[in-house]
Image (cartoon, rainbow, N blue to C red):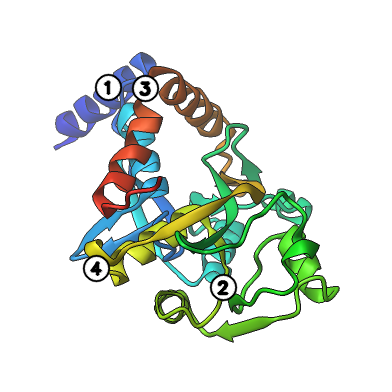
Amino acid sequence: MMRMKLLAMIGLGLCIAAGECPAGDLKVATLDYPPFQYEENGQIKGIAANIVQEIFRRLNRRIEIKFYPFPRAVENVKKGRADVIFTFYYKKEREEFADYSKEVLVDQTMSLFVHKDSPVVFDGDLSKLKPYSFGLVRFSYGSVMDNAISSGVISNTDYTAEMNSNIKKFAKRRFDILPSDRWVALYYYSKIVPKNERDLKELKPSIQTFPAYIGFSKVNRLTDLRDQVDSTLKAMKADGSYQKIIDQNISAWGIDMD
């Protein structure tokens, strides 16, 4: 028995010296936020989730992704019960407990959508859209849109509790303009509106783009891992595999955007 323990200790020492010891699963916390990350039929899917999975596959690190309400996901990282969190927006106060990736995981673009036969045009000035009605869900659309609503620049608003309902109302032409994260709108629209009835048009320019990152628990001292993730994510963007993941997800939705 003592001989077996001694051999195990020697083996452990050798693998440490060689840098080839198997690592335990990394605990990754996230929130359910289609189409960035979600679970469907027992499978984890989504643009951000697929990118994160590929990053750690390349790093030969096993990960366990779990979904939580976002405040709990943040608390788990804060306390070290989770090693990694995504999608993670930058807030100064979060630097007290999390190291942010330097590379952006995904850029989220807030856009305006109308029907293809809509007379609405947009040149970037939201005040010119005051006569039109907006269908909104009760959450933040980013500082530009939120300020336009709170200041009354946009006042003809129709609120609903969640995105599915908002898309259904848009399809029935209950309002003129659908503000939404670009990929969120495309995803939900593809789920709700039959392919032969789709007539979604995205107005240009977009309203605002803001980045989402990967966060790493400071309690668990993962700055070396953060740097490895940054290098891998940067390489994926350079070799085309990052964009390929995005394109594969969007293609699966079957949306034809003219």
Q: CA distance from mark 3 to mark 2?
A: 62 Å
Tag shown at residue 176: 2
Q: Are marks 1 and 3 in contact (CB under 8 Å)?
A: no
Amino acid tagged 4: Pro
* Closer to the eye: label 3 or 2: 2
**Label 3: which residue?**
16
Work out whether residue 107 or residue 159 is closer to the camera in this orientation and state it: 159
**Label 4: which residue?**
194
Quarter-of-image position of residue 184: bottom left
Q: Indicate the position of residue 148 as horizontal and vertical percent values.
A: 79, 67
* Closer to the eye: label 1 or 3: 3
* Closer to the eye: label 3 or 4: 4
Which is nearer the N-term, disc 3 or disc 2? 3
Q: Are marks 2 and 4 in contact (CB under 8 Å)?
A: no
* Closer to the eye: label 1 or 4: 4
- Asked whether residue 17 is in view, the answer is yes
Relative to 45, 226 lies left or right: right
Q: Indicate the position of residue 106 as horizontal and vertical percent values.
A: 52, 42
Q: Are marks 3 and 2 in contact (CB under 8 Å)?
A: no
Amino acid tagged 1: Ile
Amino acid tagged 2: Asp
Secondary structure under tag 4 reads loop
Residue at 21% across, 34% down:
5
Which is nearer the N-term, disc 1 or disc 3? 1
Q: CA distance from mark 1 to mark 4?
A: 63 Å
Q: CA distance from mark 2 to mark 1?
A: 70 Å
**Label 1: which residue?**
10
Q: CA distance from mark 2 to mark 4?
A: 20 Å
Secondary structure under tag 3 reads helix
Q: CA distance from mark 1 to mark 3?
A: 10 Å
Which is nearer the N-term, disc 1 or disc 4? 1
Are there few (<14), some (14-19), or many (20+) residues within 10 Å of tag 4?
few
